[in-house]
Amino acid sequence: MICIKVLQIENSKILENRAANVTRDLIGSRIKAFRQARGLSQDDVARLLGFKDRQTVSTIETGTRRVSAQELLLAVEKLGAPIEYFTDPFRLEGEARFSWRQSGVPREQLEEHETCASRWIGAYRTLMPRVGRKTRLVRPSLGLTKRSRYEDAIDAGERFAAEFELGAVPAEHLVEVMEDALGILVLMVDAEAGISGAACRLPDLDAVLIARHEIAGRRHVDLAHELFHILTWEAMPPKHVEEAVESGGGRVEQMANNFAAAVLMPSAEVVRSGSWEKLDPDALVARLNLVASVLQVTSSALRWRLVALGELPAKRAQEIPEAALRNNGRMEVKSAPPPLFSKPFAEVLKMALEQGRVSARRAAELVDVSVDDLPELLAAHGVDYEVEL
């Protein structure tokens, strides 16, 4: 937070330039977001800023009235927020809705990670149009509601895999379909321990974040799970925080798990090897681990898919020791994680750098690397960029 002393010596010309370089809609929406987050009424803000009535605040929030440099300075002082809160276009204050898939993460850590995620998504959303790329005009959705059956979610998952031709191993192509066919931003990120992933809804963009250091099978299940939330957000908005479980949970979470399982584990591939129910315990575990590895999912997720398909009784699935399924039966998992962020993200960042839309220093700050390491981050996605000294 900027202290009053610093505010008093802030050059008014700089503030004037900042106010002029951002749209009135942006500042107004940020004032509204701050007000709502603090539980303040428009009358409260009017009194704090010395306006004659709430109508003035209303016209500022809707973008009808511009905020002067002096009023912006007063807002920073009286509302107790840094000036970047009101003027930084890369922030998502009051716009983004997140749903986190996590397990036992303290609220403070989750909020801190959400701030970082907002910065990454906000940078991409802001820079896209500046470099000539556009978000999708029409958003895809699934025709499901909270009253839909679990069988409906399974059917939707199977149809999704078929219509987008995900093939025998859908996990290999899901990210590509989400990015290219659906216009969803997918980011592989370094997440706090316990965070599996998140879905983010913006007025003009959808995004999914996945913890890249999770094992591959869990990453894929999380990805398909978050895809369900993106495709059903308006009909059944997910909670801000959900427990990362492969079975159980609330109704919407169970539907998401069923959809994800159907997308990633085609019934034809799952039942191809014959009857599962007749296998003895050791043979069942061995086949679970083998088929799950081929499909690039977790063995635990596969067993519940078998239950849903009627191929395995729920009682037998529950009796399988978790330790036998851990890492799909392998002692160690040493596969390298995918590179940070994504190729579309890297491409937009490179174009913004080359076109002077963002400085190398600012870009490095956004992605939490040094300026010298920025080319390496982009090169990991096959995007060449040289920092100009």
Image (tube, rainbow, N blue to C red):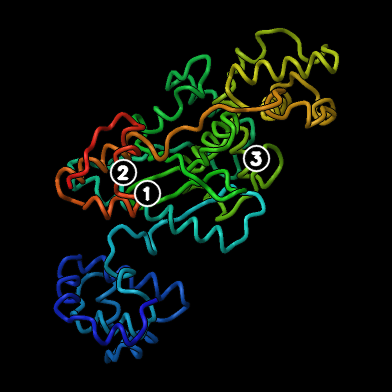
Q: Residue at x 20, y 41 (%)?
A: 351
Q: Please, what secondary structure does the residue beneath circle 3 have?
A: helix
| Residue 75: image location, x then y, percent | 31, 81
In-image side of 96 versus 246 (left or right): left
Q: Is residue 142 visible?
A: yes
Residue underneath mark 1: 369
Query: Answer yes or no: do the residues labelled 1 and 2 have beta carbons within 8 Å?
Result: yes
Q: Earlier in the sequence, mark 1 or mark 2?
A: 1
Q: In the displayed structure, would residue 31 be above or below residue 282?
A: below
Q: Earlier in the sequence, mark 1 or mark 3?
A: 3
Q: Please, what secondary structure does the residue beneath circle 1 have?
A: loop
In-image side of 3 versus 300 (left or right): left
| Residue 230: image location, x then y, percent | 46, 42
Q: Residue at x 55, y 34 (%)?
A: 219
Amino acid carrying label 2: it is: Leu
Amino acid carrying label 1: it is: Val
Corner quadrant of residue 325: top right
In-image side of 220 versus 60 (left or right): right
| Residue 179: image location, x then y, percent | 37, 33
Q: Residue at x 83, y 16 (%)?
A: 282
In space, the residues marked 1 and 3 are separated at their CA atoms by: 38 Å
Q: Which quadrant, please, contains the N terminus?
A: bottom left
Residue underneath mark 2: 374
Residue underneath mark 3: 254
Amino acid carrying label 3: it is: Gln
